[in-house]
Amino acid sequence: MKKVFKNVSFVLLLLKMCIIFGQETVAQKRIVIDVGHGGKDSGAIGINGIQEKDVVLNIALEILSLNENSETPMDIYLTRYSDTLISLLDRTKLAKSLDADLFISLHCNHSNNPNARGIEVYVSNSESHYLDDSTWLAFQLQAALKREMGFESRGVKFGNFQVLRGTTTYCPSILVEFGFLSNRDESKYYQKLESYQVLAFVIWKSLII
C-alpha cells in the first residue's frame, strides 16, 4: 500500500463538510464518487498514452456538473477534484465521515489481450447488511450502460478491493471498470469530450433511482 499522501484540497473538503452539516435542513441522497488513482499513480495507460486517472476524473467532473445544474441535485462529493493522489484509506474515511448513502469507485481496465473489452461492475465479496443493495445497484448500472450506450457487459462480479472492504459496513458500495484502455475502440471512445457527457448522464440517471 502506498504511503498516505496528505494534501490541502482534501483537508479543505473535510472542513467544508463540517460547515454544511451545521446548515443542512433537508435530507438529500448523499453520494461519494471515488475518482480512482491520481497524481503519480496514473492507473492503466492505454492506446495513444491515455491515462486511467484522467478518464475517471473527466467522468466524475461531468457527473458533478450535471448534478449541480439539475432541478433536484443530489448531495455528491468527489474523493478528488484534480490530479492529486488520495490514499485508499482516506477515500473510505471520507465516505464514513459524510455518512454517505452510496459509495461508487470509478476505474478503467487494462489487459495484455488487445481484444478484451467491456464494462465490469464489482461489489464486495464480504457479507454485509448492504450487500443486497450494492448488488442491485451494480446490476442496474450495468444494464443502463449496456442499454443506453451499447457497452458490452462483462458481468457483475465480487471482489476484494480495499475501497469496497472499507465501506461495505456502513453504505452500499460498488466499483466500476469503464472498459479497457488497452482496447483500441474503447480507448478511442474516451478521447472525445462528448463521450464523457453522455456517459455521465447515464450514470447520474442511474444514481437518482
Image: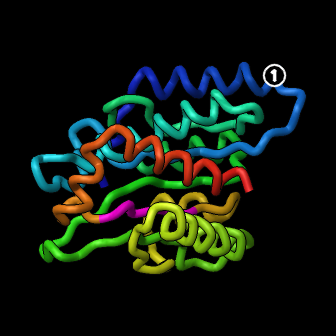
Q: Is residue 162 left or right of residue 100?
A: left
Q: Nearer the viewer, residue 31 or 96?
A: 31
Q: Magenta region: which residues?
A: 174-179
Q: Which residue is mark 1?
A: 22
Q: Position of residue 127 (x, y in %)?
A: 64, 79
Q: Position of residue 95 (x, y in %)?
A: 61, 46
Q: Nearer the viewer, residue 3 or 140?
A: 140
Q: Is residue 36 left or right of residue 92?
A: left
Q: Nearer the viewer, residue 163 or 108?
A: 108
Tell me: residue 63, above or below residue 156.
above
**What residue appears at the point 63 percent right and 35 percent down from the top-left corner?**
67
Q: Residues within 10 Å of mark 1 (few under 14, many from 20)?
A: few
**What residue appears at the point 18 percent right and 47 percent down from the top-left corner?**
50
Residue type at mark 1: give it.
Answer: Gly
In this orientation, does residue 29 appear?
yes
Does the segment drawn in magenta span residue 178? yes
**What residue appears at the point 77 percent right and 27 percent down from the top-left corner?**
21
> Among all residues in the image, which is located at the extreme right?
25
Tell me: residue 40, above or below residue 209.
above
